[in-house]
Amino acid sequence: MNKTLGLLIALLLIIGGGIWWAVKQSAPQMGSVVASTLDALQEQNRLLTFTNTSTATVTTTQSRYGLSAKKTLIVKGVMRYEVDMTKLTNDDVRWDAASKTLSVRIPPIEVAPPQIDLNSIQEYGESGILRSLTNVDDALDTSNRSKAQAQLVTQAQSPVLMDLARAASKKAVAKNFEAPLKAAGIDAVIVPFFDGERDKVGRERWDLSTPLSEIGR
């Protein structure tokens, strides 16, 4: 009985040693692959992760000499959601060897200025007399363009669209890390998240995970 127990303990020690050796062998590769991926992402500067087309309808009225003029502008704009990957640092990437989880804290999403679809522009004006006798048209156009851009940005920052952009960003970042790790034969679960979502990752797991700068290469 004691002999059998001794053999079992010896076997477990051998298996444990093998696992420890495998982890030690894979750790340098893990660190190198993740570091190279991070460098590649930083070199991209801005990562376009999501786009959305919105329509803005704005109206401006100007009054002069007892007369008034009004113009309405309808325009479509493509809104781009980007992540500045130069802000992604070693401190934002952590590895939990126990669960084989790579957590990546993504920089905040930035909404780029709208790209106006010139073919979509529609304008409607009233009071041609005032518009023909003065430069009120220029003032109306300038005001409408400013209002349209602001409206497109406001629409782009709606909770629904920002949620979609965050989901798309997490998917894009995960793929960027998954591909090289998979090619290197490293099995890892990628968990991208934004700063306010740390609870989804787990504060304890994040705090106990190893920063990229400490992962062996």
Image (spheres, rainbow, N blue to C red):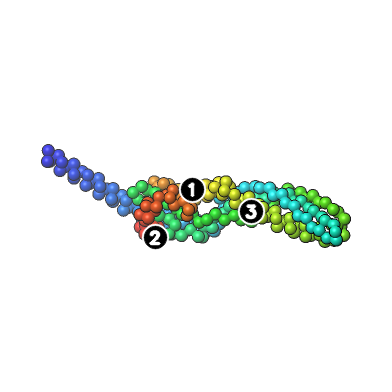
Q: Name the residue nearer the viewer: 153 or 118.
A: 153
Instruction: Please name the amino acid that badge 2 sits on.
Output: Ser
Residue 153 marker: 3
Instruction: Please name the amino acid that badge 1 sits on.
Output: Lys
- In the image: residue 90, left or right of residue 121: left
Instruction: Please name the amino acid that badge 3 sits on.
Output: Val
- Name the residue rendered at 61%, 50% in the picture: 156
- Name the residue rendered at 15%, 43% in the picture: 6
Q: Position of residue 157 (x, y in %)?
A: 59, 51
Q: Are marks 3 and 1 in contact (CB under 8 Å)?
A: no
Q: Name the residue nearer the viewer: 215 or 111.
A: 111
Q: Indicate which disc, 1 or 2, sits on the residue closer to the N terminus.
A: 1
Is residue 56 visible to the viewer in this orientation of the structure?
A: yes
Which SS class for mark 2? helix
Q: Are marks 3 and 2 in contact (CB under 8 Å)?
A: no
- Name the residue rendered at 48%, 58% in the picture: 88
- In whole angstroms, how far apart are the C-alphas of marks 3 and 1? 28 Å
Q: Position of residue 41 (x, y in %)?
A: 50, 56
The tally of labels here is: 3
Instruction: Identify residue for label 1.
Output: 175
- Name the residue rendered at 35%, 57% in the picture: 216
Q: Are marks 1 and 2 in contact (CB under 8 Å)?
A: no
- In whole angstroms, how far apart are the C-alphas of marks 3 and 2? 38 Å
10 Å neighbourhood of mark 1: few (<14), some, or many (≥20)? few
Q: Name the residue nearer the viewer: 120 or 34.
A: 120
Instruction: Identify residue for label 2.
Output: 213
- In whole angstroms, how far apart are the C-alphas of marks 1 and 2? 21 Å
Q: Residue furthest left?
A: 2
Which SS class for mark 1? helix
For discs 3 and 2, the disc positioned in front in the rendered view: 3
Quadrant of the rendering where the C terminus is positioned: bottom left
